[in-house]
Image (spheres, grey):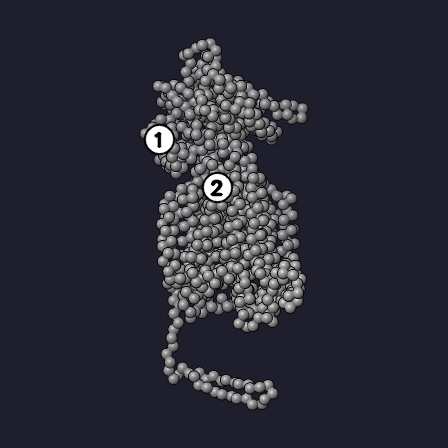
Amino acid sequence: MLRQVLHRGLGTSFSRLGHFVASHPVFFASAPVLISILLGASFSRYQVEESVEHLLAPTHSLAKIERNLVDSLFPVNRSKHRLYSDLQTPGRYGRVIITSFRKANMLDQHHTDLILKLHSAVTRIQVQRPGFNYTFAHICILNNDKTCIVDDIVHVLEELKAARSSNRTNFAITYPITHLKDGREVYNGHQLGGVTVHSKDRVKSAEAIQLTYYLQAINSLNDMVAEKWESIFCDTVELFQKSNRKVKMYPFTSSSLKEDFQKTSRVSERYLITSLVLVVTLAILCCSMQDCVRSKPWLGLLGLLTVTLATLTAAGIINLTGGKYNSTFLGIPFVMLVDEAQNTTLSPEIEADFYLVCMHQDTVSDASSKTSLSAGLVGAINGLNLSLPTLASDQLHLNKGHGLYGTFEMLSSWRKTREDQHVKERTAAVFADSMLSFSLTTAMYLVTFGIGASPFTNIEAARIFCCNSCIAIFFNYLYVLSFYGSSLVFTGYIENNYQHSIFCRKVPKPEVLQEKPAWYRFLLTARFSEDTDDSEETNTYESHLLVWFLKRYYCDWITNTYVKPFVVLFYLVYISFALMGYLQVSEGSDLSNIVATATRTIEYTTAQQKYFSNYSPVIGFYIYESIEYWNTSVQEDVLEGYHLSKKYNNEVDVVASRMFLVAKTMETKREELYDLLETLRKLSLTSKVKFIVFNPSFVYMDRYASSVGAPLQNSCISALFLLFFSAFLVADSLINVWLTLTVASVEFGVIGFMTLWKVELDCISVLCLIYGINYTIDNCAPLLSTFVLGKEFTRTKWVKNALEVHGVAILQSYLCYIVGLIPLAAVPSNLTRTLFRCLFLIALVTFFHCFAILPVILTFLPPSKKKRKEKKNPENREEIECVEMVDMDSTRVVDQITTV
């Protein structure tokens, strides 16, 4: 009883709202446009958030605390000279991998001379500034002897060249540790790639060599010069490549990731324009019909304009309230940092095969560390395939899916109203019929994305995504009520005045049209109310192609007794394949998912994985308590890198020390690297010596699995709670039961099939799954509501009725949505393709449930639609008074009272 009262009360409220909007259409049409223009003007001062760590690293991360402790114990300065450098911070650098197309030995004489020639060209790079030209010598990281630090592999190649010049044959390079002529042992595991060794680790050949150049960034001027040097460095390497076509070079700098991230937006622009043109065209066609009076092409365009205004308003509000956008917010910004260490783990049989290297208090420099940092920073955030703060394009897709359906549903309700009613009454009926379900689905969007925008979300980019989506969807709801509602009023007056739906010209009577040419009659075809009797009035809009197709063919076909077994069988196959994919779900770990396809980042990281994956990134072990270093071997290996805090009578108190692990690795899954991190964490808690482990990549992947899944988990829980509490608002709680089952079936299928389509579980796919919950409810709720609330007739009859009433709106919004998604598949970026695959699967599976699964399942599952036969007895009698009027001129009136 309470549900019926609430349902009727809300219906009455929306009816009055519709009447009010129809009474003031100019105000409700102009206000959203003015608000959007005013708020959209704030884009002249929008701010960009470029901090990758802020956006993608888990907000609450133990690794961040560990990094602060490491920084306090071992502050980074400019003195870097022995081995692994910058384990706390990446800094500025330029890096290049040199290899051959024919897998030649890069240590032979020809390639050695070529690499040293490239090294000489790089060190001669100049950055021109007013009054001074900076070279590598001016901005390089300095050693203790005030000389530039260069990779030890350069010294190895120089010694190799000198040995060949003097015909010495006793010079040998060992791997992964070799000896220089000054007696130093240097680690070359991250500088030589594709290595083939003789006995005793002597290098026979190497297919790739990596050089790294470290730059200072101690102040703003220095950082600006270093950034410019990085750009010239890439140009120099590419120019050198053109003059030496037998070798392949892969340059990379600390700025490459940001530049390639911005490139994703640039390469996506024309595809977005194509998508917009296709959606506009199809939306206009979906709202058109042969009848030039009842056709509503302008409403298709105005529906898209409604979505655009809402997105612009939301973006303006975010901007004015201090929100920061990524530089590609107006395009398709996708960022993913992929951990090169994703396939790194300790080999079980050689867990003890590691290299402990002691460090001075000053962080030292070597290509091995920078290579490991590349592993950490070119991609430690494995699989965070993320569209950032939130994507104007993604918001447009989200609003397009939700907003367009709302507009098409209102148009469908308009077609059900009587043409002899006033426009205000028809608008009130439209609001009463469609706004309740649209309001409930909008509330579902706001709750699910609102939970994602809460502090419970541990990844800032995901939180920003959900926050922006909430605001955009809220204003989309308001603008559908106001702007689109008033647009419906204007087109209603055009229809009532029998004006052409496009040209707004009065349509002549049929007798006048007979005298006109054929093309003129075709353009002005319309049915007049005088020519339509009462029995045909309700079928006025059946000339619409989709309405005619559903009512005449599809509804009868899908409910056919012989079709149902095949649909059930197809659903079982669907569940089977979804289960197969669900059991293979994995977190994002493919390095090719970072940015646009043809970029330096992709090429470099692919080459690095191919040639330099034999050894893991460098993991630092930091002992942060005073212990007795009584063992002589420990003193020799460890105490060279210590932190001194107090001196008493020439006695030194060692407060902290550090050592580093480089593990032999094998190709494996990212989960095993998580296991390695968790194992080391547990060991640090149980060990007698207090220590921590740290690598820059830990900041990003710490608690990554739980951080990625948390938004989806919270949104699912919030959706279930909302479905439970909304049971008091809907007329029958069975609607919510069916909705819950449908959402579960759709989400299960999407997860399974996206895994089979090689889409991994990462941030973008998780956000798409959150959207999938709402998209499914958006499309399925009206169908289920109409079916469940239906009385008297059979289940099959009500399934047909539900499809006839709501199927056209669902089909129209689906076609527009799919057409808008298709251009994303052609964007040369794996991230946009991931977005396309997720959203396409959500739309396809939801469409499959709306037009196949639910219409079949509902015909033989509750609720029952059997008509109750009332017993005939003398007590159930009615007295019907029949009044017969014979003639207007006659005074004879027959009153007959009949008992039935």
Task: Between residue 405 and residue 550, name the one nearer to us.
Answer: 550
Pointer 1: what residue?
A: 347
Disc marking residue 385: 2
Residue lying at 37% horizontally and 60% vertically, measured from the top left: 562
Residue lying at 37% horizontally and 48% vertically, measured from the top left: 577
Sequence-earlier tag: 2 or 1: 1
Residue lying at 44% horizontally and 43% vertically, measured from the top left: 759
Count numbered badges in the picture.
2
Q: Above or below — where is 84 with respect to 873? A: above
Task: Between residue 758 and residue 1, name the one nearer to us.
Answer: 758
Q: Above or below — where is 170 with respect to 11? A: above
Q: Nearer the viewer, mark 2 or mark 1?
A: 2
- State the image coordinates of residue 489 (x, y, percent, origin top left): 61, 63
Residue lying at 44% horizontally and 83% vertically, measured from the top left: 878
- State the image coordinates of residue 387 (x, y, percent, origin top left): 52, 43
Q: Report the Cα–Cα distance between label 2 and label 1.
A: 28 Å
Query: What's under tag 1, amino acid-wise?
Result: Ser
Label 1 SS: loop
Query: What's under tag 2, amino acid-wise?
Result: Asn
Question: Where does the C terminus fall, quadrant-wise?
Answer: bottom left
Label 2 SS: loop
